[in-house]
Image (cartoon, rainbow, N blue to C red):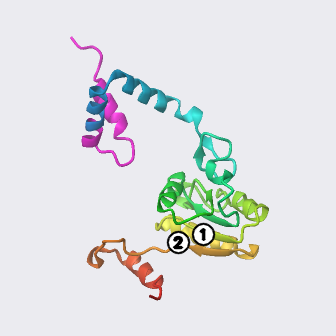
Amino acid sequence: MDDGGDPIGELVRMLVRLPGVGEKSARRIAFHVLGAPPEFARALGQSVATLAERVRRCATCGVYTSRAVCTLCDDPRRARDVLCVVARPMDVDAIERTRAFAGRYHVLHCLLDPLGGVGPAEFPLEALIDRIRGEGVREVILATPPTVEGEATSLYLAESLRGLGVAVSRIASGVPHGGDLEFTDPITLGRALEGRRSL
């Protein structure tokens, strides 16, 4: 009689709690781990178990790192006077993959969301203002997501930074490459028209 419960089902239930992982993918991962050498499962478990102890927020920009100051902030080749403001550390990763930005980052770790308990009083604005003043920033690029909360945060930041003497811009949004206008939502299409440029 098996009195050990259901370890595969338990792992699947844990995996489906991860973003973007459905039950089918979770089962595929679980069976992959079972089919791999035991050392792989042990190393994977150890890596996950010690992640919170080995990773912290960069003291300067707030991205996740294993060091006190991340490699992006520590890189002398990156422009110190251009700051890209993002909501989450994964947004930094997405922008870095484009290889189109060579400045520095500031991670908010939240967006304005009064219904979720983040209003202007709870928003971490002072840390951003301190960096702008202390590091001689001349341009701030707002790269918050194109959601209601992201747009509200972007407008709030643009207004709050107005008196600091820095140029403030918002990343463009529009029709994705390979997209079809027929299936593009009206807000995205409207932003694409507003952000058009000369050829």
Mark 1 neighbour density, 10 Å: few (under 14) some (14–19) many (20 or more): many
Q: Is residue 27 above or below residue 183?
A: above
Residue 12 percent coordinates (x, y): 31, 34
| Mark 2 or 1, nearer chain start | 1
Amino acid found under the numbered disc labelled 2: Ile
Element type where label 2 sits in the image: loop
Amino acid found under the numbered disc labelled 1: Ile
Q: Which residue is mark 2?
A: 171
Q: Is residue 40 left or right of residue 139?
A: left
As measured in the structure, the alpha-carbon distance from the residue carrying label 2 to the one carrying label 1 is 7 Å
Residue 184 percent coordinates (x, y): 32, 74
Residue 2 among those drawn in magenta? yes
Residue 23 among those drawn in magenta? yes
Which one is nearer the viewer's eye here, 117 or 132? 132
Q: Which residue is mark 1?
A: 141
Image quadrant occupied by the C terminus: bottom left
Q: Residue at x 21, y 11 (%)?
A: 1
Q: Start and end of the magenta stretch? A: 1-27
Q: Is residue 13 left or right of residue 162?
A: left
Q: Residue at x 53, y 30 (%)?
A: 50
